[in-house]
Every structure is written in C-alpha cells, then in structure tokens.
Amino acid sequence: WPKMGILKWPLTTYKTYREFYKRRVLLLAQYHDNLDEFQAFVRDNPRFIYKPLSESCGKGVRIIDPTEFSSPQELYHSLRKNAGVAEELIIQDERLGQFHPSSVNTIRMPQVINRAGETVIFSPVLRVGQKNSIVDNAGAGGILANIDPNTGVVYTDGADEFGNRYTRHPQTNVTFKGFVIPRWDEAVCLVKELSRVLPTVRYIGWDLALTRDGWVVVEGNVCAEFKVLQIADKRGLRDSLCKMI
C-alpha cells in the first residue's frame, strides 16, 4: 500500500463508523506521530489487541501487555515499525463466549443493498475459535456455522476450511445446530443502520461481537471472503447474490 493509503483506510473507516465500534481504536504507523495519544491509551488499557494492517485472516493479531516492555515509549516504537491498530479489548457476552472463551466469537453479517434499495442480510455466519486461539477467523482454524437470517437460529453443523465438520465444539462440547443467537433482532437492526451510513457501498461483510451491553462492530470487510458463507452450508450462493445486485 502507498504510505497515505495505510493511514487513510483505517482512520477513515473508524471515524465514519466510530459510534458503532463503542471502543477506542488507535492507528500505529511510522508516518503517524501520536505518542501522547498512545501513552494515554496504555494508561487506560492494561491489555489491548494489536492488529497488523499488512495481514489478514487473523494473522499477527495478538493481545499486548504493556508491562512486558520497559516503557510505553519502547512499546510504541516497536509496534509502529509495521503499521497496525491498537484496540480496546472486547468483553463478550457469556452466551457466545461459551463456544470458545479464548476468542471473541463473532457473527459475519453480510449486507447487500439490492436493486430496490433494500438492505438484505445475506447468509450470516457464526464464527468461533478453537484450540485456545484468540481469533475466530476461518483462515486461522476457526469454525463456521450458518445462521437463518430470519430467526437467528444456527441451522448447520460447524465446519472449517480444512473439510472437518463438527456437531459440537471440539473443546467445549457446545452444540452448533439449533443454537439461538442472542439479541438477533438487534444485530439485524444494527446492520441495517450501518448500511445507511454509506449506501453507495452495496456489499459489506460486517463482523459483530455481542457484549453485555449489546452488539458492537469488530470490523467491516469490503470483500468478506465469500467462501466463508458457503462452507458449512455446502451451498453455492453466486446465483442468489446476482439476482439481488
């Protein structure tokens, strides 16, 4: 990416949708001088998530403990060598956390604005981590299960990108099929509200996390790995999407 591209993309996205994140997100990059802001962030956050911008699929995401460094300044200069973002930790609702407590387990909620200008929730997916990973991304071994967009009920077994299928989570023994996503109507309403912010962007894959206070945006994905929507259901979706757009 060009230097300014690294800076503008995460900052613009966060500023545009800031009210929906409900937490602080801080850009760290060589060309962005914000040491004072970072020091204040560290004072308020004894631990935080760091996500490198050059990676995807959860690679390089880690929890940072500032006490493991000699000073906030040392940590700051270490992290900004490669552009990334620091975020406050999300404390998830126990009902989704029961699948795999080590990761924040999210809902991939693709929104499509169809030809009539209506927002459609298109093939939502439950994503959970496994093997003590802190991320739930399919590319990092996460398990996927499809959700009925009308009811919020998981209607498939779990599956991963390596061809494995799971009736229950292999570490926690929680059953996938039949699980009711809590506060589903609120998640749907949130995505429809998000879609109205930039209605010219007709397809976004939103990742949402459920906290005790409600749903928050984890991130928005302009490509949103279309395969993730099809793995557990074992059903192609291209024709359905083309009819809408």
Image (spheres, rainbow, N blue to C red):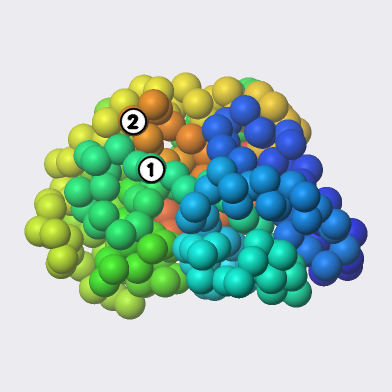
Q: Is residue 142 positioned above or below 190 on the image?
A: below
Q: Is residue 139 left or right of residue 20?
A: left
Q: Residues within 10 Å of mark 1 (few under 14, many from 20)?
A: few
Q: In this rendering, does residue 123 appear at all?
A: no
Provide residue 146's location: percent of width, then percent of height: 31, 48
User: Which quarter of the image is occupied by the C terminus?
Assistant: top right
Q: Is residue 241 left or right of residue 53?
A: left
Q: Secondary structure at mark 1?
A: loop
Provide residue 55's location: percent of width, then percent of height: 62, 71
How far, Cα to Cα, is label 2 from label 1?
Answer: 8 Å
Tag 1: amino acid: Ile
- What numbered label is drawn on residue 212? 2
Q: Which residue is mark 1?
A: 91
Label 1 near label 2: C-beta < 8 Å?
yes
Q: Secondary structure at mark 2?
A: loop
Q: Is residue 77 left or right of residue 208?
A: right
Q: Quadrant of residue 71?
A: bottom right
Residue toward you, 24 or 68 = 68
For image coordinates 53% across by 48% down, the residue present is 45
Q: In this rendering, does residue 208 appear at all?
A: yes
Q: Is residue 24 left or right of residue 176?
A: right
